[in-house]
Image: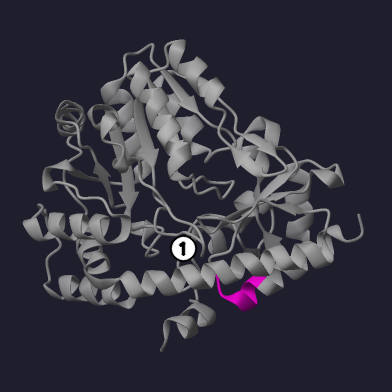
Amino acid sequence: MSDLEAFNRGAERKGTSCIKWDFQKADYGMENLLPFSIADADYPTYSPILEALKRRIDNGVIGYTDLGEDYFSAVAGWCRRRHGWEIEHSWVVPTGGIVPAMCNAIGALLPPDGKVIVQPPVYDPFYSIIEASGRKMVKNDLICDENGYRMDYAGLEKACKDGASMLLLCSPHNPVCRVWTEDELKRVADICGRYGVYVVSDEIHWDLIMDGYHHTTMGQFRELYERLIVCTSCSKTFNIAGLETSNLIIPGKETRETYQKWLYSRYLFCPNTLGLEAVKAAYADGDQWVDSQRAYLTGNAKLVCDFMAEHLPRVRVARPEGTYLLWLDMTDYGLSSDELIRRIAQAGAGLNGGNHYGEAYDGFVRMNVACPRAQLTAGLACIKKALEAL
């Protein structure tokens, strides 16, 4: 089966304890919706990963595991081939999920009264982990104009000047779909470097870039190395989020050792045995599959943009540049995000309310388009049904 055939065919996820298929009642008060919510894909995982997992399971024991040079070589090879970034093996710090890893970074590196910058609208766990850590949150909202979203550099510099200790950067940005340019990120590096601010760059979507765009990793800015953590994972790229395996890349020796000491003192150092096998299989030769997926997602994003332009022109779609999460501005309807989500659910589809990503974004909706095209087409029909009479 070709990659295209696999993406179009999809995967049967109902009955597998899948969050977005089997637990809809908790979020929507109803069931049997077409889901376009939580960020995993509704098509099969890269098949060599599944084969590697089967081989490991067939060994008969899934015990404690440590990291060999083959693992570090796989991660370093992917960084070099896909992102033009030469890293040292010692920089790689395997962890569980990226969200807990970022939470641990806050705990390990910042004083109890530290301030952490976020750039709303942004992935909602960013808020939660800062609040859980007891640190102070500093919000520096993105600016949106006729050209789309951009960072507020004056606001960022003010926050740094006023004593912020860390920036949680989302790159590519979830939910507004931005792939920050090298020039934009250079300005971030200059500002944070000038004030000695840690940059924790969540690059979980770094492989999922729409045709015509290019991702620049913060790892390209050596002036940040003493205070930089780049958060990477196979989870979105290869649809293996359930394995909870990520890799932080920490070039600075002092930062890396401080972070590792924090992990080790909490016994957070035993890798997921199956997750390690998946990473090695993915990074060995998954390049062509990723390229096919990127092309497919670009087509899905175009389908949504064209559909809205033709059938629901009051819905403004943020320009899709990266991730598979589209940001839909439905404020022209004058309804809250909760009410929009309720109406769309009644029409048969489950999406995410924009108010989760920032209080100022009520009336926005986020839509996951990592699914077979037929499923996406059916979901768009549901949205049209919910909104066309308004």
In the rendered view, tell whether residue 158 sits above or below residue 59.
Answer: above
Is residue 44 visible in the rendered image? The answer is no
Q: Start and end of the magenta stretch?
A: 371-376
Question: Which of the 4 image quarters holds residue 191?
Answer: top left
Say which residue appears at 63% left-offset and 53% top-offset. 319
Q: Residue furthest left?
A: 69
- Residue 91: image location, x then y, percent: 17, 42
- Please state the horizontal and vertical placement of residue 86, each as a whole percent of the image: 20, 50
Front-most of residues 117 and 271: 117
Element marked by disc 1:
loop
> Residue 127 colored magenta?
no
Q: Amino acid at mark 1?
A: Ser
In this view, 99 is above or below 279:
above
Image quadrant of residue 289?
Answer: bottom left
Quadrant where the image shows the N terminus: bottom left
> In this orientation, does residue 66 appear?
yes
Residue positioned 53% across, 59% down in the render: 324
Q: Residue at x 31, y 14 (%)?
A: 111
- Residue underneath mark 1: 17
Across and down, in percent, residue 262 comes to 20, 28
The percent coordinates of residue 257 (x first, y second) are 14, 29
Q: Nearer the viewer, residue 204 or 218?
A: 218
In the image, is residue 78 above or below residue 14? Answer: above
Q: In terms of secondary structure, what is the magenta stretch mainly?
A: helix
Task: Give whichever of 200, 266 is nearer the camera.
Answer: 200
Quadrant in the picture for the C terminus: bottom right
